[in-house]
Image (cartoon, grey):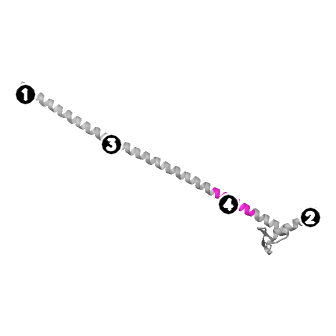
Amino acid sequence: MKWDGERDTEKDKKKREDQRRESFDFRNAEDVSQRLEKEENDADDLSEKHDSYELKRVGVNDTEEYKKKYEDQRRESFDFRNAEGVRQRLEKEKGSMANIDGIDERDGGNNEYIVDNKVVSDAEKRRETKNNSNYQKNR
């Protein structure tokens, strides 16, 4: 009986050691599994963070491009309006000068000649002559 008791004790010790080893193996496998899952989650988080950063940069670049395009369009609009204003003022001045000189440009008053390497129209020539004659009268 003593031997039976010792054998039972030996069996029990061996059984507990096996259970302990199995427990270590299970815990080790579970730890490895959790570590791999954590590394995968960290990699996914890093990838999402990188994607988010890329999207932010693309958005910022798009915004900068839009602002630049808007400024170019605005500048072109200012240039066009300025040129149109200048053109209209010149037309108005040209029209008022023609009316002052009594020249109707529609009746052929826009003939141009080259004098001293300058393009001179009939209207300007008449104006000069008129101004010179007025200058001489006032002397």
What mark, if any, has residue 136 been given in the picture? 2
| Amino acid type shown at disc 4 | Phe
Q: Earlier in the sequence, mark 4 or mark 3?
A: 3
In-image side of 7 versus 133 (left or right): left
Residue that mark 1 sits on? 4
Which mark is first along the chain, 4 or 2? 4
Q: Position of residue 109 (x, y in %)?
A: 80, 73
Check whether the beta carbons of the residues at disc 4 and disc 1 lie within 8 A of each other: no
- Where does label 4 land, which residue? 80
Q: Identify the residue under disc 3.
A: 37
The stretch of residues the image draws in magenta is 74-88
Give above or below for 52 relative to 117: above
Q: Residue 43's image quarter?
A: top left
CA distance separating discs 2 and 3: 105 Å
* Secondary element type, mark 1: helix
Residue 70 rendering spot, x and y as whole percentages: 60, 55
How far apart marks 4 and 1 lie (CA) works out to: 112 Å
